[in-house]
Image: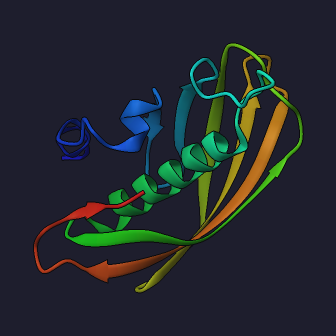
Amino acid sequence: MANGWLHDMPNAIFAKMGIEFVEVSRDRVVARMPVAGNTQPYGLLHGGATGVLCETVASFGTGVIVGLDKVVTGVELNVNHIRGVRDGSVTCTGVPLHIGRTTAVWDMRVEDDRGRLAAVSRLTLVIRDTGGAGGASG
């Protein structure tokens, strides 16, 4: 179900940024993103790229939990950047704090390849009916 849904979105931002899902369950979602191609002018991982990674993890995780017949949209994203990352990849682990009928809240940790904390994030999402169209918006 979820894998087919992902493959139907080759033009989604997560695909363009090289985000790959490592683990997906109702309890947590883990995704990895390369630093190369996602940097700011000083060669560090771009803060906006970190935000995209975090929102993608939480949006996809919520979509998996509530079902693909719902639209999941981020409405508030907070990212605290702790450490700059210049190379390799970063891994985001997201866990749901709340999954309700109309809202969800997730916490994310982003770590570099050595397991050092690079960022923490929290995302609030709204959950809506699609009328059958399906899909998280990330």
Residue positioned most to the top: 88
Q: Residue at x 20, y 46 (%)?
A: 5
Q: Position of residue 56 (x, y in %)?
A: 48, 50
Residue sitting nearer the eye, 97 or 122: 122
Residue positioned most to the bottom: 102
Asked which quadrant contains residue 93, the reply is top right
Residue sitting nearer the eye, 26 or 79: 79
Residue positioned most to the right: 82
Q: Residue at x 43, y 47 (%)?
A: 25
Rendering colour mode:
rainbow
Asked which quadrant contains residue 45, the reply is top right
Rendered position, 138 above or below 77:
above
Rendered position, 71 above or below 87:
below
Instruction: Decide if residue 64 is on the left or right side of residue 38.
Output: left
Residue sitting nearer the eye, 138 or 111: 138
Q: Position of residue 44 (x, y in %)?
A: 78, 26
Residue sitting nearer the eye, 17 or 126: 17
Residue positioned most to the front: 41
Q: Residue at x 85, y 27 (%)?
A: 116
Instruction: Decide if residue 112 is on the left or right side of residue 93.
Output: right
Asked which quadrant contains residue 114, the reply is top right
Q: Position of residue 27 (x, y in %)?
A: 52, 53
Q: Residue at x 47, y 31 (%)?
A: 17
Q: Position of residue 58 (x, y in %)?
A: 52, 56
Task: Report how many numbered discs are placed on residues in the image.
Answer: 0
Quadrant holding the C terminus = bottom left
Residue 99 in view in this figure: no
Residue 63 in view in this figure: yes
